[in-house]
Amino acid sequence: MDKLDRRILAALQRNNLVTAQELGDEIGLSASAVQRRIKRLREEGLVVRDTAVLDAAALGRHVTVIVDVTVDREAKQVVESFRRRAEATPAVQQCYYVTGEADFVLVITARSMDDYHQIARRLFLDDPNIKRFRTSVVMDSLKRTLDIPVRQD
């Protein structure tokens, strides 16, 4: 991966709808050269998927919570069972298996606190393998990105 590839990746993170022509003009390549590079970067697995960032509030999702989850025992089947349920729950935006006091950290979006309570009941309260969960309600989102820093030199 060279400097031009890194510039393409950085630009795609900012706006993946940028045209090959616009991107080529920005970095000094032809549109076809940009397209070839993007195709190769996708084939190599550097670009995993294209996605749109939606306005949660406009879609009625007014509550975001971050939940630390501790399972009763870290048996493989317990961890896998919870992982599958978290992945299958549309309100779970992100799920991380972590070290430290908790076993999992989840980011969950909900329409209301009552909606979150129903999600929590299904994911945590109804599962005898969940030892505890701690919820932090997001008051304000100061930075929200999945961008990965791409070295430009």
Image (spheres, rainbow, N blue to C red):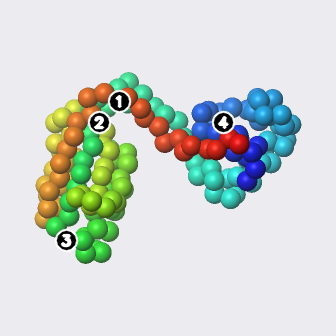
| Residue 18 locus on image (x, y percent) | 69, 32
| Residue 83 locus on image (x, y percent) | 33, 62
- Contact between marks 2 and 1 (CB within 8 A): the answer is yes
Q: Secondary structure at mark 3?
A: loop
- Assign the C terminus to one quadrant of the image: top right
- Quadrant of the image occupied by residue 51: top right
Q: Nearer the viewer, residue 23 or 77?
A: 23
Task: Tell me if mark 2 has few (under 14), some (14-19) or many (20+) residues whose alpha carbon lies within 10 angstroms of its own.
Answer: many
Q: Tell which circle, 1 or 3, labels the residue nearer the N-terminal end.
A: 3
| Residue 95 locus on image (x, y percent) | 35, 53
Task: Tell me if mark 3 has few (under 14), some (14-19) or many (20+) residues whose alpha carbon lies within 10 angstroms of its own.
Answer: few
Q: Which residue is mark 1?
A: 141
Q: Label 2 vs label 1: CA separation?
A: 9 Å
Q: Which residue is mark 3?
A: 73
Q: Tell which circle, 2 or 1, labels the residue nearer the N-terminal end.
A: 2
Residue 145 located left or right of residue 97: right
- Which amino acid type is shown beneath numbered disc 3? Arg
Task: Tell me if mark 4 has few (under 14), some (14-19) or many (20+) residues whose alpha carbon lies within 10 angstroms of its own.
Answer: some
Q: Which residue is mark 2?
A: 64
Q: Secondary structure at mark 4?
A: helix
Mark 2 or 4, which is nearer the eye? Answer: 4
Q: Label 2 vs label 4: CA separation?
A: 28 Å
